[in-house]
Amino acid sequence: MPHHKLRFGMFMGPFHAPDLDPTYAIERDLQLVTLLDTLGFDEAWIGEHHSGGFEIIASPEVFIAAAAERTKHIRLGTGVKSLPYHHPFIVAETMAQLDHMTRGRVMFGAGPGALPSDARMFGIKPVDSRPRMDEALDCIVALLRGETVTKKTAWFELNDARLSVGCYSKPTMELAVAAIRSPAGAIAAGRHGASLLVLSAVDDASLKHHLSNWKIYEETCSLYGHVADRLRWQFALQIHLAESREQARKDVAYGLEKWIGYANDIVPAPNPPPRGLPDPAGWMVDNERAIIGTPDDAVKKIEHMLEVTGGFGGVLMFAQDWANWGATQRSLQLIAEEVRPKLNGSNFLRQASYDRNAPITDTNRALAQTAVDEAQARYAAGKMRG
């Protein structure tokens, strides 16, 4: 059995090609969260973006409010709220309200903003985004914990500010900070004892880089008096599954090339997949940028990730339209049906019970027949007396 339960969830930019109707796309995102809730996924993190055409949710809080009304169990987080674009008091007030509206199911994930094209519209230099995030996060965390904050920076001011209602969750809701390449996210998360959300490929080089950031996180947690718990370390991955490898690769022919175009044209991350590949899915698998295959392929790769990193607490699937709607739903079903129970040992006791009783079937069959024979004999005896 595993040492702990691995959480499963979704990291929703989300990614939708510009030829998909936006009204329908948002509705389908809500349906996707409802499906995750039905399938027993633990959480969904909703992003914030304002340019580029693909990632179309501008307000994760509005989306979370709607999703909370459609679901029962799944936890819902901002994944992430771009702090440099918002006054920290409004962010804290909004999150506290959502905490009450969801009865504690909301989580607060923060980041500096992923797209320079977003920052440009706000008149913010990307180099200033991370310092602004740190300034805002310091205030937001304090406010969510019920503290009174006075602070003046170059871009916001707080004067004896405190929340009007406060949080439903005590002492506060779950906090998380996203990290991709730089150590800034690990430092910010460690400073506040927040969870660490990693957006990652699945190759060993990427995993070892994130492991070095985890050590920075541990050091920062220790410095600020927090415990660095690996259960609060989660990896967001590109995953699509089907009953066979061939079917999985056929599925992603639907939209993978469009996503590669977005990765080249808009996303600032280095080394995007090349355009015009004869076999984009094969390239993604061979270069360990994604898991595209069967449930067994996913289990094997995630087990390897756990071994390389020393363990973490959760796996998040990126929400993207690589496959059509039906195949996307089937992929999530396969994760719930086959991947999650294998990695979490969900059927350990059931299998042990089966294995204990299967070798003595003949004995049990004989005992059952003896019980039937005795029941028939009692019936016959009673009938004769009557």
Image (cartoon, helix red, strand yellow):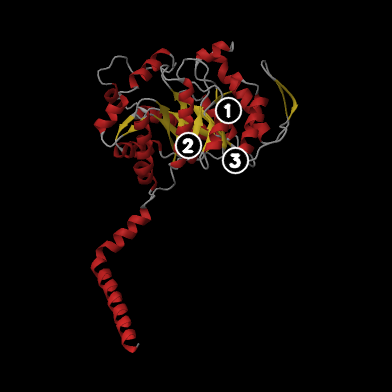
The residue wearing badge 1 is 62
Q: Are marks 1 and 2 in contact (CB under 8 Å)?
A: no
Q: Are marks 3 and 2 in contact (CB under 8 Å)?
A: no
> Measured from the top left, where is residue 277 in percent x and y?
27, 17
Decide which of tag 1 and tag 2 comes sooner along the chain: 2
Q: Which mark is residue 318?
A: none
- Cα–Cα span, label 3 and label 2: 18 Å
Instruction: Label 2: state its secondary structure.
Output: helix
Residue depicted at 29% across the width and 78% down the height: 376
| Of residues 344 and 31, the one drawn nearer to the viewer in this rendering | 31
| Of residues 313 and 120, the one drawn nearer to the viewer in this rendering | 120
Q: Which mark is residue 104?
A: 3
> Measured from the top left, where is residue 211 in percent x and y?
43, 32
Decide which of tag 1 and tag 3 comes sooner along the chain: 1
> Measured from the top left, where is residue 336 in percent x and y?
39, 41
Residue depicted at 39% across the width and 46% down the height: 344
Q: Amino acid at mark 1?
A: Val
- Cα–Cα span, label 1 and label 2: 16 Å
Instruction: Label 3: state its secondary structure.
Output: loop
Q: Is residue 250 left or right of residue 233?
A: left
Q: Is residue 151 left or right of residue 222?
A: right
Please say if 80 is above or below 307: above
